[in-house]
Structures are given as C-alpha cells and as structure tokens.
Amino acid sequence: MASIPSPSTHHFYPNKFSYSTSKSSFFPFIVSCMDQQPQQDENTKQVGRRDIILRSSEIAALGALFNFSGKKPSYLGVQKNPFGLALCPATDNCISTSENISDATHYAPPWNYNPEGKRGNISREKAMAELLQVVKSTKPDKSSPKIVEKTADYVRVEYESPILGLVDDVEFWFPPGKKTIVQYRAASRLGNYDFDANRKRIKALRMQLEKKGWASEDTV
C-alpha cells in the first residue's frame, strides 16, 4: 500500500477511478484483448495475424477517440512542503525516490552521478547533459520520450505509448547542495496498474547512465 500523505503536508492524490462512465473503463478491456494470443494451428495462423492487425487499429482508434493521454497532474514539479518530488498515489503505477524505503511498491533509490568522487570534479551541468542524452536515446518499451520541461535542476519527460497514446510522466531533480544525487519520480496518468513499465523504464535509463559512471544508491 502506498504511503498516503496527510492533507496538511502533501497534495491530495485520487486513488480511485470510475469504471462505469469514465474512459478509463475501457482500459481493462483493452489489456484483456491485447493479452489474448491467436491460435497457433495451421488453419488459424493467417486469421490470427489479421485479427491482431484489426485489433491494433481498433485500439488506436479508441485511443484517439477517448484521449488516453490523460491530463497532466497538478502536483508535478518540485514541492515546497516537504521539499522534493511528490509522493505516489495509492496505485501500482508509480515509483518515487521520495517514498519511504519500506514501501516496496513505490520506493525507488536515487542516483549518484559521481559515486565516491570517482569521476573527479564533474559538474551538475555535465551530469544534466548526460541524463538528457540517455533519455533521448533510450526507448526500452518503444514509448516516445518528449522533454516538456527543463530548468537548471529539473527535467520532466512525457513518455507516450505507440498505440494507445497513454502518457507517463517521468521527473528528474538535482537537489541543491554538494551531494551529487539525482531524485526522480515516474508515474502513469491513467489506470491503477502499469505492469512495472515505469520501473523497467527507470532501470533501463540507469543501466545506460552506469556506462557513463553513474550509480544507484541501491538497485531498482
């Protein structure tokens, strides 16, 4: 269960979605359709291929019709109280370095772009450039990354899925101070589950950054 922030210190996160009239009610149906595999005998292989193509077209049409991209959450960005990235809602489609380490569902460890000072006097600007390069070049799940916000210490990336147009928001933040730490948060806008898509994406980015000398404070 996610850590639920109190109203006095954190933003409120909705943790339930209506499945009667909202467009998110189509999501379980779509996932179910996509999970079904066509028959593999010789008489149905060709039909199975056509069925997959048809389903893909229908799903894409549904995505365009019902705008599965969702609305950008108002609580994104660096929060003032407490200072840092937002916590996760009580859904299984979000990870954040701001969560308590005891929350195995939502916690993810921060990154260090100069672990133990092994990279010398690498600047925050250099580390930011490395991060942006990896974000642009790494597409582990074929979602298209789009950098939509960038400041000297913060980056927000939108990852859009190729068929449904589902959007995940991934944030990176370089906290002030002498520590060479990078915090991050990755969350889906719609639904209750992401089948570990955000966690796998963060892992893929970390593995590419490790080639440049970065390290995780733990594993994710």
Image: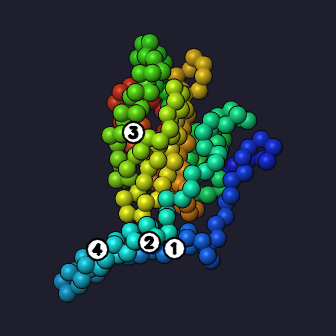
* Chain-order first, disc 4 or disc 2: 4
Identify the element where label 4 is drawn. Answer: helix
Q: Are marks 1 and 2 in contact (CB under 8 Å)?
A: yes
* Chain-order first, disc 2 or disc 3: 2
Question: How far, Cα to Cα, is label 2 from label 3?
Answer: 28 Å
Q: Do the residues labelled 3 and 1 touch (CB within 8 Å)?
A: no
Identify the element where label 3 is drawn. Answer: helix
Q: Are marks 4 and 3 in contact (CB under 8 Å)?
A: no
Where does label 1 land, which residue? 26
Circle 3 residues within 10 Å: few <14, some 14–19, many ≥20? many
Rendered image coloring scheme: rainbow
Against 38, residue 87 (above or below) is: above
Question: How far, Cα to Cα, is label 4 from label 2?
Answer: 14 Å
Q: Do the residues labelled 4 and 2 touch (CB within 8 Å)?
A: no
Against 166, residue 158 (above or below) is: above
Residue 5 is situated, as x and y percent measured from the top left of the image, at 74, 47
Q: How many labels does the image show?
A: 4
Where does label 4 land, which residue? 53
From the viewer's perspective, tell me whether residue 50 is left or right of residue 167. Answer: left
Q: Identity of the amino acid at label 2? A: Leu
Where does label 2 land, which residue? 62
Where does label 3 land, which residue? 135
Q: Which of 140 and 21 is in front in this view?
A: 21
* Chain-order first, disc 4 or disc 3: 4
Name the residue at the right extreme: 8
